[in-house]
Image (cartoon, rainbow, N blue to C red):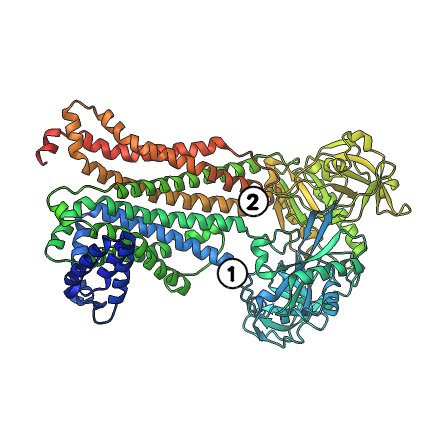
Amino acid sequence: MIKHLAQRFFQWFCHPDYFDEIQGDLEEIYQRNKTQSNRAAQWKYLGQVIVLFRPSLIRSLSQPYLTHPAMFKHYFRISTRNLLRQKLFTTINIGGLAFGLAAFLLITEYLRFEESYDRFFTDADRIYRVSLIQTVNGEVVTREATSYYPTAKVLKDELPEVVEATVSHQYERQIFRKGESVIREKGVVSADSNFLKIFDYKVLQGSPETMLTEPNSLVLTESKARFYFDDRNPLGETLMILGRFNQPFKVTGVIEDVPKNTQYKFDILMSDASLNDRDDHEGWRFSNYYTFVKLVPSANITSLTSKLQTLTKKYLDEDSQESFSLIAVPDIHLQSDYQYEAEISGSARAVSFLRIIAFFILIIAWINYVNLSTARAVNRAKEVGLRKVIGAYKAQLMNQFLLEAMLVNFIAALIALLISELSLSYFHQLIGKEVVPHVWNHPPFLRSLTIFFVIGTLVSGFYPALVLSGFKPVAVLKGKFVNSKSGTALRKGLVVVQFTASIMLIAGTLIVYHQLEFMRGRDLGISTDYVVGFLRPEVGREQWEEHTSQVESFQETLRQHTAIEKVGGTSNIPGGEDGDISYTTTKIGLVGLSEPMPGSTYWQSIDEHFLETVDMQLLAGRNFDRTRIADSLVVMVNQTFLRKFDIADEEEIVHEQIQFGEDDDGSKYQIIGVVKDFNRTSLRSDVEPTIYFPSYIPRAFVLKLKSESYTAGLAHLNETWDKFFPDAPLDYTFLDDRFAALYEQDQRFGQIFGTFAGLAIFIAMLGLFGLSSFMAVQRTAEVGVRKVLGATVSSIIGIFYKDFLVLLGIAGLVSLPLVYYGMNGWLQSYAYRIDFPWLLAGAALLIVVIFALLTVGYQIYKVAILNPAKTLRHE
């Protein structure tokens, strides 16, 4: 072994003019030394080779025959002729590589966008959001993206690691006036003067130090400034905000539009000082504010987290179950799935799945090229043998075959660029966002295209070039050349990889689709058909009494129309996000039945018409009744609330009392009814333990329309709204649309998964088509002989099937455990989910088997039906 390696090294570096003579001398010396000790002789041989490694004997590494332009011109001409001669295989290779590379690069652009969230801020890695975590008995029960208003000031004052801190609040809506029109703005955020110190958006007009310090101040993004003021200078101008404020606000600054790849989006910043009527401004009761801090570069997060625990006990309660936690702002989009997120978060798991799909697609395309190139080795063996006989070096042959691979990959890269540009609009529609306007002038895309063109040339071209250039001319020209067992084994191994990837992708697609169908078909516990939800207008405190009367008259007017069945009131419209409900972490107990228990309990305010409007089932007790004076201190609870206290009988709990906190003198509420659980949000989340309080001037309404005349009902709703609330735009949604929107991200993931999985399978079957076609041609004579000896067409096809069925069996054994590991983990993210569907995984295997056998069978059948007299005549 030592001698062999030394010989290879010597052959590589020694100049051809001296090689034969020196090699003979080295061999003589080795044979003399071998008589004493073979191992010692080999080590001496190696030492002599190392001594010979000197400039006077080293060959020139820049050999003219490898780099001369004429040689490359010759290589190019030969490669082009060969590609044109084999049109089918060239088309399969280029098509597979082009589609594979285009899909890979488009997915990569999407993943790059998803992973770029909030990384454009200066010192983004030092900016953290302060969140609240509640832990009961060592188990985390809730995670909130928000915290208390004083949190920012406390952290800045007491922690030396905190350089800056800011507090902000995201509004669900604010009503602005533009001329005679009223505009419902959803992207309004209140912020203090430190906000723009941490988030350094480019300021286009105004002073960043003062623009958010004064009450009734607004900072607009560039597009909003243009929307409200056209080309006029907006600084010093005013905008009227209706509703709870009902006063003009002065524009004090304009900043650049907020990028799409940020988790905390807004169009308008309102100065925090404007909120002078905020409830419990400096207290620790309401945790509905977003707090962000910027840390010193040397901050130790572990040490800082320990300090946060101390602050929690200092400002909240020594026995508080809550604690502050930090999450880096660039990690929020993919890593944080807390309640009250500013927007629906992305999914790190989905990103990982798509990255795997992207590499599957590209690897399958490369495998196609390797398989077809090495399978065609027999056809090119004589070409290689003749070239070697007339003096071609192995390096020259490798250069030629690498150039051929580079030519194929280059054409494929150009076509991939074209495919990517043409399919960009569909791709954006598929993912639900625009990640890049064009790819042909987008530097990151072009850089990735160039990198993977080079990598693809080496990966797909190096092994075939090594195989083809390594043929022995004597064996080839004597007709004794056959495919090597190692080459055949490699091709079979690569086919197994293709089959494995195909089975995994098909199974994943089927499982995702089945889970989505399960969620869409599950009984929510309420009726959403022809039910619309909408918020009532907001007003200031001085207008509340008049507004109350308006709301009551508005409801009565709606109920009088024949197209409207029912009108109910609620604090939270069903179909909202996880954080679209209030909750308390105060200990809650049942008087005389249980001690106060820690944990999160959710609460919702409803009126006496809500249950019947959404067909929510009352299991025990009675509904609210506004005519009863005593009903001011009564509640209803759901089944999950009872399970929290291990109560199985709904009737048992009616008339019992709920106590908030551990103070026996505190407020107590009598339970008058138990309602059936219903899923108010996505099936990713469990039904929460919920208490329902009576509220007869609710924050929102739900309206049940008659199916046969729902358009008339909607028209009446619009007319009635305009009559009672002319200064507020009506914005209603159907409940089934709201619930469908909760699954939009899952739906898109399923569509993306299915689309690119289908493309990967298409590329794999394209390669299998080419490989089976070539194998059929190669074995034409064998088929002819078998037919002469009496074999039928079906038996011949069966012989070919046997090899592929073995490969499919291996692929099934490898893929099914991987499918279970990956997809079962994905299903675990849903509170309500299907059991792992082994039947669908088996169906995926069956689909691949059918596709493979049809593809192979078609090619073999074309050869098997030929007249053997014709096929054998040419042998």
Q: Residue 54, position in %: x, y?
A: 25, 70
- Residue type at mark 2 is Tyr
Q: Is residue 533 left or right of residue 348?
A: right
In the displayed structure, 489 sits above or below 303; it is above
| Observer able to see residue 424 | no
Judge from the rendering whether residue 166 lies leftward or rightward of residue 3; answer left or right.
right
Classify residue 726 by image quadrant: bottom right
Please name the amino acid that badge 1 sits on.
Answer: Ser
Crowding at mark 1 (Cα within 10 Å: few <14, some 14-19, many 20+)? some
Residue 191 versus residue 770 in the image, above or below? below
Disc marking residue 395: none
Left/right of residue 840 with respect to residue 40 in the rendered view: right
Residue where numbered disc 1 is placed: 116
Task: Tell which residue pokes out farthest to the front in this image.
Answer: 36
Residue 148, located in which quarter of the rendered image?
bottom right
Q: Which residue is mark 2?
A: 743
* Mark toward the viewer: 1 or 2: 1
Give the residue displayed 88% in from the left and 41% down from the top.
Answer: 629
Nearer the observer, 489 or 508: 489
Q: Position of residue 122 (x, y in %)?
A: 56, 70
Q: Secondary structure at mark 2?
A: loop
